[in-house]
């Protein structure tokens, strides 16, 4: 019985891994230099470097051309926080404009989103955020009732910013782990009976 179970698990693992062309990665940047600007104060006013501020996301891609690089054409999903940058709905407009990643190398991306509310002249407002792996991210605020016009907050990447990226465990990894634990439990039970 144990041999049959092991053979079945091995075959299932081979079948699953042969289908696993899509890969997922979790990434994060930790530590940013914040700044504030407005039309009244166009020169940015910098705060202190914040080593605990984290920006993180996840993407799934398939290296269809087998060149070892994930390009924007091969991206299946891209999120920052819990927000997708490929499937926007409602008032939110978003786009992933640039992307490339070579495993073991640098992650490059540029994404933005914008949310607009109301009608101009009667309570209109817009919040727009752009994200860049090269510079950081910034959010600008506009509305039709403020005397100061557009303003914004930026979080810049500096040499102190830490970047991390790691593969998302594939479903068959968790399946094989669970199956292995079940197999160990069955083997222990069998040895107790003997």
Image (spheres, helix red, strand yellow):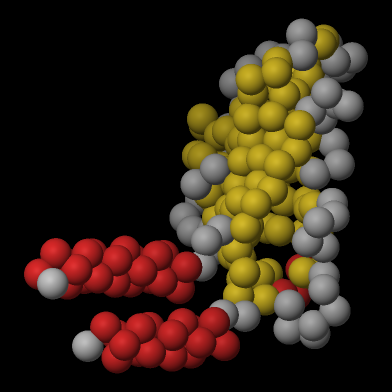
Residue 69 rendering spot, x and y as whole percentages: 82, 70
Residue depicted at 52% across the width and 61% down the height: 169
Q: Quadrant of the N terminus?
A: bottom left
Q: Position of residue 125 (x, y in %)?
A: 58, 33
User: Up-down: is 165 above or below 171?
Assistant: above
Q: Is residue 129 visible?
A: no
The residue at the far front in this view is 194
- Residue 131 x, y percent position in the rendering: 73, 42
Q: Position of residue 32 (x, y in %)?
A: 75, 23
Identify the residue at image location x=85%, y=79%.
67
- Quadrant that contains the C terminus: bottom left
Q: Residue at x 80, y 44 (%)?
A: 133
- Residue 17 visible, this angle: yes
Residue 94 drawn above or below residue 127: below
In this view, the residue in front, 90 or 185, is: 185
Image-quadrant location for residue 20: bottom right
């Amino acid at each position: 019985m144990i041999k049959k179970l092991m053979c079945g698990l091995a075959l299932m693992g081979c079948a699953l891994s042969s289908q696993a062309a899509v890969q997922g990665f979790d990434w994060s940047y930790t530590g940013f230099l914040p700044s504030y600007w407005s039309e009244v104060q166009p020169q940015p006013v910098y705060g202190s470097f914040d080593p605990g501020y984290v920006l993180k996301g996840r993407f799934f891609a398939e290296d269809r051309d087998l060149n070892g690089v994930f390009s924007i054409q091969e991206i299946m999903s891209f999120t920052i926080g819990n927000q997708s940058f490929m499937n926007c709905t409602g008032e939110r407009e978003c786009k992933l404009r640039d992307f490339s990643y070579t495993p073991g190398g640098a992650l490059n991306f540029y994404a933005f989103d914008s949310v607009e509310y109301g009608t101009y002249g009667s309570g209109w407002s817009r919040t727009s955020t752009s994200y860049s792996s090269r510079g950081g991210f910034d959010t600008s605020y506009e509305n039709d009732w403020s005397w100061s016009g557009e303003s914004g907050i930026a979080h810049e990447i500096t040499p102190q910013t830490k970047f991390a990226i790691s593969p998302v465990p594939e479903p068959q990894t968790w399946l094989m782990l669970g199956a292995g634990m079940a197999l160990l439990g069955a083997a222990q039970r069998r040895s107790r009976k003997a």
